[in-house]
Image: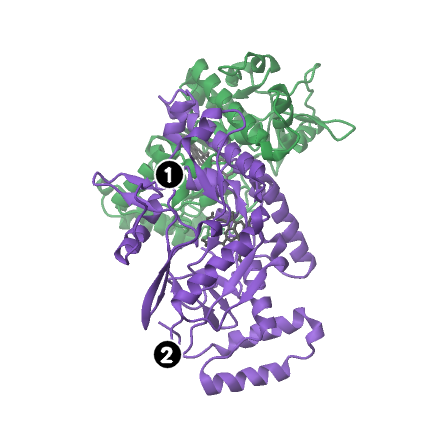
Chain colours: A green, B purple
């Protein structure tokens, strides 16, 4: 599952970038020679801590699908490359969540575990995000919880996870960390590692009684961080939430919590025809509820209007720094009220750059945004 | 402004397509030979009426930005290729609008006027759509009417148009038809050629008092229809409206009528922060008003939910017919509540096909959706 040896051209390009953007490091030649020698001898090379930090931040900066890149320099990088043991990795993910949640003042953090090496595949985190709610498939095909995680839930049960006696729609799944030559680790997230917000609505009191909740820290854990030709398959990272991710996707998608039909009825709307725009009305109220609840709870969240403006500021700053800013319109533009956000009304540069994050099930580098 | 001679490869490809999709026409060889000879002699060729009809319909079928393609076979094609006189063309555009409006039961229609020929450029319609509302720029830079048409309004005045004594936000501009070697024609649209709908809201009675209105027939008139290598620069076409075009773009865009701030205040919403999602709430109510008003008036309109489902049906039908369906995600996905429409959750084929419609200020064929 690993590449034979590191791509030297990609390594060199990265090292040159690192030195070019950090003039205080001086000329790159010495470091290039070092890395050439190390790759010749071992097939790979080890980033300096400074390279790792820079590389992870630039990977965020290059994430064409991410609207939240204005603060890319602020990413806190945890250097945990010496960890290869699944259980130890899972434990450090727990630590990650606490650091990131920070009592509500959410901080962008990445934890970088062991990289792939020639002949030795690194461990991988099976969960798509560090915090995922179980999806229990009933005998009728209906699902209690998050339908998206049905397979992960099954996998956890196969590995010995015992769901709570009283199953609910928001049961936090255990972490599953796998390594080719080791037993997978199954580690429950302790309650104090999972900051959550109860969802209520500023004007619809009955909404709070539904028991909806969501977690504060969105930490993607199944993407491969690639820096200078080196792959880090276990490198969970988090920002804070943009409200639409929860209100317009997690709660609304028909293959997630699919709440619109129920809420439409509870709101007393005419759901006899889509032309009444009842879905659109519920969608707005659900998103108001999410933003309102996070704000009330003192948990960092952003809205799609603010974040759109920030993203355009980010592009301006990048261009002022002489860099292009790759962006994927279909991901950057928010999934609701898109026409009235500032990011809708223009096109973006489509060339992918490295360092970057890639889907966990891919290899190498993909140069084009599709 | 015209190409020297018709691209024979493109002509041939089109003729083969025409015969392949219409087996009753028999083998294509005879027609190919005819066209080869005609192009050799004149630099171009004349489509048969049947080719014109087929070509225009397939141009619609290939319009990657159009969500409304399910009914592409129903396009009514008006063969007006012998008209080159600007005034006569404008008069036939008036006729087009009446046919299309059809007392409210809107019909998709295209009127094809003279094509470009080697050494003889065809007439062009200056208006972006046949019906456009004036935008009067005040001395303070403010605009009465549709800001998008400020330049066209100025142009019309330059050509001698006299705005109404009492200028309003919905003054219909005259048609302007231009030809290199002729005086431009300036023709007012008679009242009975412009079916309009007054906008009211099912629950907010004050909205009707604002005097908002919109026209029933969206007829794009500045795109170049290209069939088998022949360009028809004046070929206005119309479908019916999807509500979001009016409610989420024309009325809402900050460089159009920019109604959200005013309506937000009138609705009594807390506009102190974008986080209250007041813009999103106004947007939904405005779009409800549009759909409601067209329905009440008995004027054809579609909503973005219905149309998204229809478009996916269209793709299925195209694929069943062995064809790919080019589509531009950024245009197909509606500008509001996009995440809860069915077209959001997939990608599309990006290869552009001909025949097609191209922006009026371009030349030739563009093979990729950007
Ligand atoms: C600081 C606040 C942040 C905000 C508000 C933010 C916002 C977003 C949003 C809204 C998306 C689209 C998600 C979806 O539709 O599923 C996204 C995607 C993404 N973001 Fe961010 N982000 C933030 C921080 C970060 C950080 C710290 C990183 C990496 C270090 C990052 C990397 C990415 C990547 C790689 C994707 C694409 C994920 C995929 O392909 O599934 N973001 N971001
Ligand atoms: C029958 C009902 C129709 C509906 C509901 C419909 C819907 C739409 C919508 C919503 C757009 C996007 C408009 C925008 O965002 O500005 C669009 C674009 C387009 N449609 Fe349709 N359409 C219809 C009929 C037609 C017809 C009859 C044709 C041609 C014969 C056509 C060709 C196009 C083209 C070329 C575009 C792109 C326009 C541009 O690039 O500015 N459509 N359509």
Marks 1 and 2 belong to one chain: yes
Work out whether residue A103 or residue B320 is closer to the camera in this orientation and state it.
Answer: B320
Is residue B335 visible in the rendered structure shown here? no
Q: Residue at x 57, y 46 (%)?
A: B104
From the viewer's perspective, is A208 left or right of A135?
Answer: left
Image position, residue A24 (x, y; %): 22, 40
Circle 2 — which element?
A: loop
Quadrant including the C terminus of chain B? bottom left
Kindly identify which chain the residue marked by label 1 belongs to. B
Q: Check disc 2 and report the residue beneath it.
A: B119
Circle 1/circle 2 CB separation < 8 Å: no
The dot on residue B257 is 1
Q: Is residue A144 above or below residue A122?
A: above
Image position, residue B36 (x, y; %): 53, 84
Q: Is residue A169 above or below residue B307?
A: above
- Location of residue B364 (image quadrant): bottom left
Kindly identify which chain the residue marked by label 2 belongs to. B
């Amino acid at each position: 599952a690993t590449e034979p040896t590191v791509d030297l051209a990609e390594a060199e390009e990265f090292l040159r970038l690192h030195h070019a953007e950090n003039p205080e490091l001086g000329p790159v030649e010495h470091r290039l020679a070092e890395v050439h020698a190390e790759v010749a001898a071992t097939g790979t090379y080890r980033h300096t801590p400074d390279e790792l930090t820079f590389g992870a931040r630039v990977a965020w900066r290059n994430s064409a699908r991410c609207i939240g890149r204005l603060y890319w320099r602020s990413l806190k990088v945890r250097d945990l490359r010496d960890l290869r043991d699944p259980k130890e990795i899972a434990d450090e993910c727990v630590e990650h969540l606490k650091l990131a949640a920070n009592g509500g003042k959410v901080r962008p953090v990445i934890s970088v575990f062991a990289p792939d090496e020639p002949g030795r595949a690194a461990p991988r985190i099976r969960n798509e995000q560090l915090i995922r709610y179980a999806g229990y498939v009933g005998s009728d095909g209906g699902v209690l919880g998050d339908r998206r995680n049905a397979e992960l839930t099954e996998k956890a049960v196969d590995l010995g996870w015992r769901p709570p006696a009283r199953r609910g729609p928001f049961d936090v799944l255990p972490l599953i960390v796998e390594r080719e030559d080791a037993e997978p680790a199954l580690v429950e997230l302790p309650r104090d590692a999972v900051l959550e917000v109860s969802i209520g609505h500023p004007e619809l009191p009955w909404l709070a009684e539904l028991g909806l909740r969501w977690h504060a820290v969105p930490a993607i854990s199944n993407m491969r961080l690639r820096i200078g030709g080196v792959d880090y398959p276990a490198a969970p990272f988090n920002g804070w939430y943009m409200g639409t991710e929860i209100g317009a996707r997690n709660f609304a998608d028909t293959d997630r919590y699919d709440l619109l039909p129920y809420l439409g009825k509870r709101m007393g709307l005419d759901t006899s025809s889509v032309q009444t725009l009842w879905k659109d009305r519920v969608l707005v109220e659900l998103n108001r509820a999410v933003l309102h609840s996070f704000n009330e709870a003192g948990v960092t969240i952003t809205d799609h209007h603010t974040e759109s403006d920030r993203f355009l500021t980010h592009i301006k700053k990048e261009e002022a720094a002489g860099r292009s800013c790759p962006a994927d319109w279909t991901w950057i533009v928010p999934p609701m009220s898109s026409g009235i956000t500032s990011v809708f009304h223009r096109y973006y540069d489509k060339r992918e750059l490295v360092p970057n994050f890639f889907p966990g099930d891919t290899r190498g580098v993909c140069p084009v945004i599709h």
